[in-house]
Amino acid sequence: MPGKFIVASKKRATTKLIEKALKEERHRVAIAPNGAALVDLALDKKPNAIFLGITLPGSMNGLDAARALRMLRPTENVPIIFLAENKEETKQVSNTHLPLTDCLTAPYDLAEVKTHAAGGLETGEHVADLRSIKPENEWMLAILDPLTRLYHRRYLLHQLGYEANRSTRYKTPLAVLLVDVDNLKEINRQYGILTGDTVLIETGQLLLSMMRKSEIVGRNDTQDFLVITPQTTEEGVRNLAERIRQSISEHHFILEKLDLHVTVSVGMAWTRGNDLAENLALLGRAEVALTRAKRAGKNRAEVG
């Protein structure tokens, strides 16, 4: 699907190459002559993504322009693909730790530009969809992961402690599952970080759709999710783990042009709820099981 892109670079040859690659995919392209103009243009045009050089004409460089865009609500979630001319500029991008960014390093390849543009387009749409769903209370934003809009790790650990105590008090079973996206580093390397972000967003939404009201799911780490399942039998946990693994492996991710198929490895741990120390050790056991699943070939579920 065609999108709207803005390109800004000090090098005319770079601008022309990126513009050519995007127009071959029937995207609309606007060229920004400098950093200040880029910010104005982004606010006016509302692009799906931005290709941004590190060195720009004028007093504002690409990194400063990107920081400005992240501080403005209309552009805070627009994907940015940096155009680094050398390894030093690539390192500068990495050190900024700005969200929803990717980086291409010269010499640029047309096919690679098109792939990263597709990733930026899809990620932008996914994030926009998530942002359009407002939490019932604004304070909810403080406990949500900014990318996936699922609970973040700190809140998950708080909930796990609460459920561990409740399980011990009422002698009810408790289980956790760690769901790790297989080969995410390879996806990022081949298709770009923005494509990897899209995979994480969609995987999170798939997990959420499989949960009961009593179950809690959130982003545990860079590429894995934590599921807390109170009052679930051992058989029920095993069935859930297998359903997660199979559903994701069979799912057609929205990145249709890439024909991207994703698998996950699952580590799970279960307890009857008789002992608080045993309940609190669930996450460690699930981590051991997840490591075993990865080493055994991935796309599988193991019990810890």
Image (spheres, grey):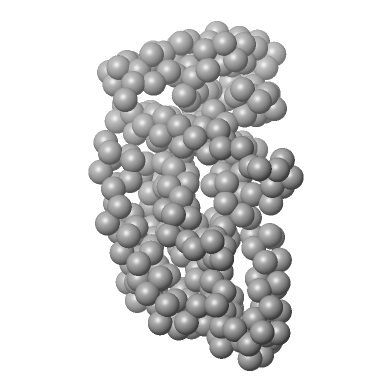
Residue drawn at x 63%, y 91% as measured from the top left: 274
Q: Where is 107 relative to 56, above or below?
A: below
From the viewer's perspective, is 26 left or right of 98? left
x and y, in percent, of residue 161 in the image: 70, 73
Residue drawn at x 49%, y 63% as measured from the top left: 212
Residue drawn at x 50%, y 23% as measured from the top left: 50
Kindly indicate the quadrant of the structure image that contains residue 219. bottom right
From the viewer's perspective, is 137 left or right of 184? right
From the viewer's perspective, is 22 left or right of 287? left
x and y, in percent, of residue 135 in the image: 63, 42
**For this rendering, which residue is in front, 168 or 219?**
168
Kindly indicate the quadrant of the structure image that contains residue 117. top left
Q: Where is 190 relative to 304, above or below?
A: above
**For this rendering, which residue is in front, 2 or 291?**
2
Q: Where is 148 relative to 34, above or below?
A: below
Residue 158 at least partly seen: yes
Residue 35 at least partly seen: no
